[in-house]
Amino acid sequence: MNPANRMAQPRLLQAMYGARRRAGLVTDRLVERVTRLRHDPVAGLPPADCDFFAVLDGRTLHVHAVLPAGTEPTDRAEIFFVRDGDTLRCPARVRREAGRLAVEAVARLGDSTDEIALSKGTWSVGLAVDAGPAGERRFSLTVEETPDRDGPTVGNPPHPVSGWLYRPGRSGDGLAQLTVTSARARAEVVQLATGHAEARIRARFVGVRPQDAPAIVFTPRGGGADVVVPIAPVGDDFEFVVPLADLAPDQLGEEVIWEAWVRTSATRMVRLGRFLHDLTDPRTVLRVSRAVLPLNGDQFVGYRPYYTAAGNLAVACLRFTRFTGTPS
C-alpha cells in the first residue's frame, strides 16, 4: 500500500469530521449491542481519543484520533486490526493539532491488491506509533456513541464491488471495532439497455457460488404463470433479452407488473435489482423512463422497469395498438 496515496486528502477529511460525526456514522446501536459480548484484545492499552471513525462509500475506513498528552513526538504511525490472533496494518499520518499529536488514516477495505482483506467477524482497531529505540507504543481508540441517522443515504452502505459490509462499532469498553459480514446472495443490475426493437439487462452475481442451470424468473404480481429465461453466465456476469412478448398481457390496455428473480439452482432463487448503493430509497433516484417497443403486427408494449424501495427490480408491461395511442 502506498502511504502517499492514502493521505492525499487530509485537509478535506478534517473539514468533514465534525459534520460526519454529528450525522451518526461512527456506529449503530445494533452492532454495538453485539460487540459488547466479545472480549476486546486491545482493552488495557492506553486510550487515544478517536473523534472520527467511519467507513465511507462502503469501502474506505477513515480514522482521526488524538494521542494522549505527553506522547513523545513521532512522524510514523499505523492503525492495526486484530482478530483471533491475526493482525493487519495500514500506514497513518501524524500531525500536530493545538499542541497535541493527531493521527489520520485512510484504509481501503476489500480483497483487491490495494485493499486490506479483513475476514468475516469483529476486528478490534488500535493505533501504533513509532517510539524510536523502544520500538512502538500501542493505543486503543475510544469512540463515542452517536444518535441514529436520518437522511437520503445510509450510514454504512455495502462495498460497491463485493457487497461485503464493514460496519464501525464499539466494544463494551467503548473501544473501536469493525464488524465485517459477507455479501448477501443477490444479482446486481449493471445496465438496463433499451433499444428500438428489444430490451436487454446486464447483471452480475454477488455472493452467489456456484450456479446450477441459472435462469431469470419473472413472477406476475397477483398470481399467474412464471416466465423463465435461461441465462449463460460468464464468471459472475450475465446478460439476457427481456421477453416482452411473453410479459405483455393478453388484453389491450391492461398492465401487468412482474417481479424479477434469478434461479441459481433447482431449490434457490435470489433477487435481481440494485443493492450496492448508499440510498435509503432507490425509487426516488434510480428512475428509469418508460419505453415503447414493437410486438407483432400493429401491437406495441409499454415497457417500464423500476426499482422498489428495497432495490428489487420490477417490470411493468402494457399492451396497446397504434390506434389506441401510446401509454401515458
Image (cartoon, rainbow, N blue to C red):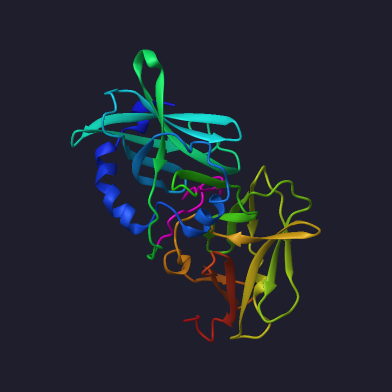
Residue 93's spot in the image, x, y percent? 32, 30
The front one of 197 and 122 is 122
Q: Is residue 291 above or below residue 186?
A: below
Residue 116 visible in rendering? no
Residue 305's spot in the image, x, y percent? 54, 68
The quadrant where residue 301 appears: bottom right
Residue 4's spot in the image, x, y percent? 34, 27
Question: Going 47% across and 65% down the picture, which residue do you hit?
Answer: 282
Question: Going 44% across and 35% down the picture, which residue do you hit?
Answer: 126
The front one of 325 and 217 is 217
Was residue 9 drawn as part of the magenta stretch in this picture? no
Residue 279 visible in rendering? yes
* Left or right, 56 with reference to 319: left
Q: Is residue 85 above or below residue 241?
A: above
The N terminus - image quarter: top left
Was residue 168 drawn as part of the magenta stretch in this picture? yes
Question: Going 51% across and 30% down the picture, which residue do you hit?
Answer: 88
Q: Is residue 274 above or below residue 4?
A: below
Q: Which residues are magenta?
A: 153-171
